[in-house]
Amino acid sequence: MSLGRRTLWWMAMCGSMAALAQPVPPHPVPPQSGSTFQSKENRALEADEFANPGMLWVEQGAKLWREARGTTGNSCADCHGDAKQTMRGVAAAYPRHDASIRRILNLEQRINHCVSENQKATSLAYESRELLSLATFVAHQSKGMPIKVDVSGASAATYGRGKALYFQRIGQMNLACTHCHDQNWGKTLLAESVSQGQPDGWPAYRLEWQTVGSLQRRLRACFFGVRAEQPAFGSDDLVALELYLAQRAAGLPITAPGVRR
Amino acid sequence: MSSGLARLRVPESAQPGEIVEVRLLIQHDMETGFRRDMQGRAVPMNVITEVRARYGDQDVFRAELGSGISANPYLAFSIRAVKTGEIRVEWIDTAGVRGSVSAVLNVT
């Protein structure tokens, strides 16, 4: 076999292998909770069921769960009963495709869908105390349960969009999510430690914000950080990114409400 | 904005003379008055100015808070358990909004 023919053979082999094997996108193995990258004090605050300030939102969410709302006068509990049982594991499967409206919704959007469609009430604003309280309360019911989202079928396109966005260089800094959260996690960026970008603790209490915020608010902060245009709350891009992050974190237990710097 | 939501925790039970820890977490923005909103208007200062705790009919703890305290303040203090009674914590903020939370300490 001449050198030229051998080279051609290798090129053909490599080409067919690349076509056959779907390359697994680079991601941290195993996934580690966002709290891993926090200070000892923040981890202690998160673990303290009483002092964790996010628990105030959980408590308020529990109250709102039982409150009548809208023209139907229904509370969440009227349909869903005791959230401890009915909401157990629900948040671990979001964002999720809703067959009735043929859309992928994240947890906040799904709650708002119930508010406007089933309770016939004015939908809640993103990052409002009410919506955050309900979302944190529902997410907290899945504490300890592994994240497991469906990215097949109707969700496949959104998953693909999220994945593409995750690897897309954006902003004046010309950085993609992957450059920090796959390639440089565990290192320090100025005074911050770079996390793996896992969504397990969200909605979380962020000390910088002095309040609980959604994962979308945190993602928007990253867009700001790389000096890119921030997608609007509830935009398809952010929901797609949430879905990609959830799939990337598959198996990681929910820890909401987390405490972040 | 203050919702008056708070958490208060005392031990399940205590023995007479025992020193117990009372823990308090209040949901409050503790707005410093130094911030501006998205329209550039100054956000008025609104912080919890005073917190008082009563055990039975006795004052056991009092604190004056200010703009240097973070949002959703967490306070913990110790009291000596005497007899079964209610621990009631009350507070007031700059806007004049009062809040309170209570729990019963069982002394056996």
Image (cartoon, rainbow, N blue to C red):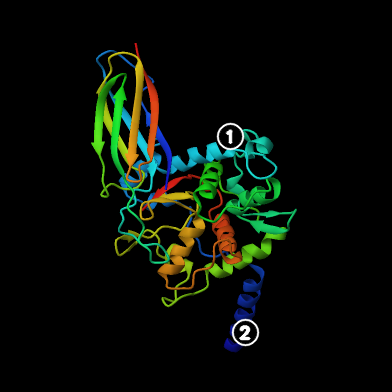
Quadrant housing the C terminus of chain B: top left
Does residue A191 appear to the left or right of A194 in the view shown? left
Asked if A184 appears above or below A45 in the picture, the reply is: below
Q: Residues within 10 Å of mark 2 (few under 14, many from 20)?
A: few
Indicate the secondary structure of the residue bearing disc 1: helix
Q: Residue at x 26, y 17 (%)?
A: B18
The chain identifier of the residue carrying mark 1 reads A
Please give left or right for residue B12 compared with residue A166 in the image.
Answer: left
Q: Amino acid at mark 2?
A: Leu
Residue B81 placement (x, y as % from top left): 28, 17
> Residue A115 location, x and y as percent?
64, 48
The image quarter containing residue B35 is bottom left
Residue at the spot of label 1: A84
Q: CA distance from mark 1 to mark 2?
A: 62 Å
Residue A105 lies, in percent from the top left, at: 64, 56
Q: Is residue A226 left or right of residue A74?
A: left
Residue at the far front: name it: B96
Residue found at x 30% / y 28%: B53
Q: Which mark is residue A172?
A: none
Q: Quadrant of residue A238?
A: bottom right
- The residue at the far right in this view is A100
Residue A190, x across and y down, in percent = 30, 65
Residue of label 2: A8
Q: Is residue A152 visible?
A: no
Q: Residue at x 63, y 77 (%)?
A: A15
The subunit letter for the residue under badge 2 reads: A
Is any atom of residue A154 visible in this view? yes
- Helix, strand or loop status at disc 2: helix
Q: What residue is rendered at 56% in x and 59% in y?
A: A242
Mark 1 or mark 2, which has the lower sequence index?
2
Q: Badge 1: how crowded within 10 Å, few (<14), some, or many (20+)?
A: few
Which of pointers 1 and 2 indicates the residue nearer the eye?
Answer: 1
